[in-house]
Amino acid sequence: MSDLRALRKRQQLNNLVAMVTELTRPGLTVVDFCSGGGHVGIVLAHSLPHSQVILIENKEESLFRAQTRSSDLGLTNIRFIQANLDYFTGPFHIGVRSTGIDQDFLFLER
């Protein structure tokens, strides 16, 4: 990855996390849809210790990597669900999806 692309990815992650952090209150549930290795969800769990963060990921290897990383960090407010995005029906207050192509989505409970 080029230095410029790495810089843009960091900015993308920082902007998404800042937006979610601003909107989230203690006790709310944040879901990271299609979480991959947990780049967004793990940062959110670390930044929001009084909120629950759920990572939804279809690929077993990616989810295992996210679980290992969060365990190494001692995060206790994070859960993992291996499922296709279409099958998650649990309640949440804020949902995020980082597509990895400079487009992020934020879903708010109505």
Image (tube, helix red, strand yellow):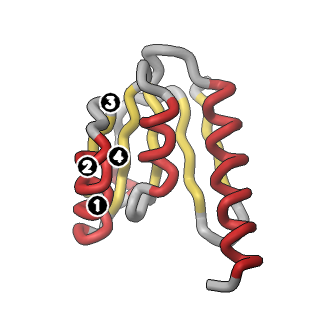
Which one is in front in this view, the residue at disc 3 or the one at disc 4?
A: 3
Q: Nearer the viewer, residue 104 or 40?
A: 40
Question: Which disc number belongs to residue 78?
Answer: none
Please name the residue that numbered disc 2 is placed on: 72
Quarter of the picture holding the N terminus: bottom right
Question: Which disc number belongs to residue 63?
Answer: 1
C-alpha distance separating marks 3 and 4: 19 Å
Question: Which disc number belongs to residue 77?
Answer: 3
In the image, 35: left or right of 40?
A: left
**Residue type, label 3:** Asn
Which one is in front in this view, the residue at disc 1 or the one at disc 2?
A: 2
Tag 2, which secondary structure? Answer: helix
Please name the residue that numbered disc 4 is placed on: 88
Which is more N-terminal, label 1 or label 4? 1
Asked if labels 1 and 3 touch by Cβ distance under 8 angstroms, the answer is no
Rendered residue at 64%/54% (across/down): 13
Tag 1, which secondary structure? Answer: helix
Picture coordinates of residue 10, whole percent (x, y) = 66, 60
Asked if labels 2 and 1 touch by Cβ distance under 8 angstroms, the answer is no
C-alpha distance separating marks 4 and 1: 15 Å
In the image, 20: left or right of 5?
A: left
In the image, 100: left or right of 43?
A: right
Q: Residues within 10 Å of mark 2 (few under 14, many from 20)?
A: few
Rendered residue at 23%/62% (across/down): 64
Which is more N-terminal, label 3 or label 2? 2
